[in-house]
């Protein structure tokens, strides 16, 4: 049995949006970005969907805002961890 290729964690989309908004994908290498994605995704609860439109129409505004705040915090913590790790080598 195989999961449908359309099934994915909605937080992946939000994390990548945040990384792009901060310009990290342009200022850091792909290994840093991949590590940051993993660190951030491990801090948020999974939210699996099949279609992006499902989230646009069925997600209450307050829940969307909470998810966005979760992403801001998770990405910030991931950056702090990676930057501290780079300093200490």
Image (cartoon, rainbow, N blue to C red):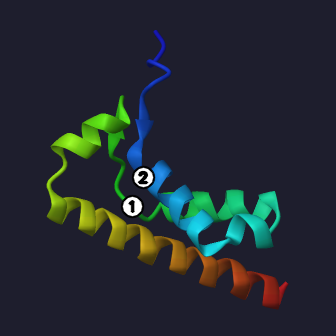
Vertical placement of 78 versus 20: above or below?
Answer: below
Residue identifier under label 1: 44
**Would residue 71 be found to the left or right of residue 55 on screen?**
right
Vertical placement of 53 versus 60: above or below?
Answer: above
Mark 1 or 2, closer to the camera? 2
The secondary structure type at the circle numbered 2 is: helix
Residue for point 59% across, 57% down: 38
Residue 73 place in picture, x, y as percent: 43, 77
Residue for point 52% across, 59% down: 17
Judging depth in this view, the residue of 19 and 46 nearest the camera is 19
Q: In which quadrant is the C terminus drawn?
A: bottom right
User: Along the polypeptide, which appears first: circle 1 or circle 2?
Assistant: 2
Residue for point 69% across, 56% down: 34
* Outermost residue toward the top in this view: 1
Residue 75 place in picture, x, y as percent: 52, 72
Residue 53 place in picture, x, y as percent: 31, 36
**Would residue 64 be found to the left or right of residue 51 on screen?**
left
Instruction: Indicate the quadrant where residue 9 lies.
Output: top left
Judging depth in this view, the residue of 10 and 89 nearest the camera is 10
**Would residue 33 be found to the left or right of residue 3 on screen?**
right
Instruction: Indicate the quadrant where residue 86 lies.
Output: bottom right
Marks 1/2 in contact by CB < 8 Å: the verdict is: yes
Instruction: Indicate the quadrant where residue 70 lies.
Output: bottom left
The secondary structure type at the circle numbered 1 is: loop
Residue identifier under label 2: 11
Residue for point 36% across, 49% down: 46
Q: Mark 2, residues whose alpha carbon is within 10 Å: few (<14), some, or many (≥20)?
A: many
**Residue 80 numbered tag:** none
């Amino acid at each position: 049995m195989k999961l449908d290729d359309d099934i994915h964690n909605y937080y992946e989309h939000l994390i990548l949006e945040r990384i792009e908004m901060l310009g990290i994908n342009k200022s850091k290498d792909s290994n840093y970005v991949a590590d940051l994605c993993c660190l951030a995704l491990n801090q948020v609860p999974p939210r699996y969907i099949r279609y992006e439109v499902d989230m646009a129409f069925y997600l209450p505004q307050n829940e969307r805002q909470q998810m966005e705040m979760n992403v801001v915090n998770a990405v910030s913590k991931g950056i702090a961890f990676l930057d501290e790790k780079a300093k200490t080598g």
